[in-house]
Image (spheres, rainbow, N blue to C red):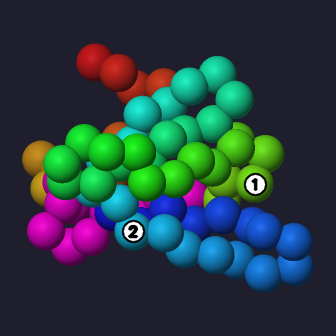
Amino acid sequence: MKVVFNLGNAYEELNCFDFREYEHGIVLRNEEGYNIGYVPHEILSHIVPHPSEQVAFENGQLPEPGDDE
């Protein structure tokens, strides 16, 4: 997946295999489970899955926020 964050006046991207979310930010991990970076929530923009990581939804639409059924 690709983690996008705003560092100053520009957006930066980091590729990672997985991440763990903590109170103040997310820790990025590689395929072996090693920490490869940290992004605080304040500068985190969004996380984009690679095409092979995308999930197909039953009706083809993204679920509505708060719809955890």
Asked whether residue 11 appears in the rendered view, the answer is: yes
Query: Does the magenta run of residues contain 52?
Result: yes
Query: Does residue 59 show up?
Result: no
Q: Residue at x 28, y 18 (%)?
A: 69
Front residue (pair 39, 50): 39
Identify residue type, mark 1.
Answer: Ile
Label 2 neighbour load within 10 Å: few <14, some 14-19, many 20+:
some
Residue 59 in the figure: left or right of residue 25? left
Q: Is residue 49 magenta?
A: yes
> Residue at (64%, 22%) from the top-left corner?
23
Residue 59 drawn above or below residue 66: below
Q: Is residue 9 left or right of residue 49?
A: right
Report how far apart the C-alphas of labels 1 and 2 lie in the structure. 16 Å
Give the residue displayed 12% in from the left and 47% down from the top. 58
Tell me where the magenta segment starts and ends, as one range: 46-55
Picture layout, residue 8 above or below residue 35: below
Q: Which residue is mark 1?
A: 43
Answer with left or right where residue 14 lies relative to residue 69.
right
Disc 2 designates what residue? 15
Which element carries disc 2, helix, strand or loop? strand
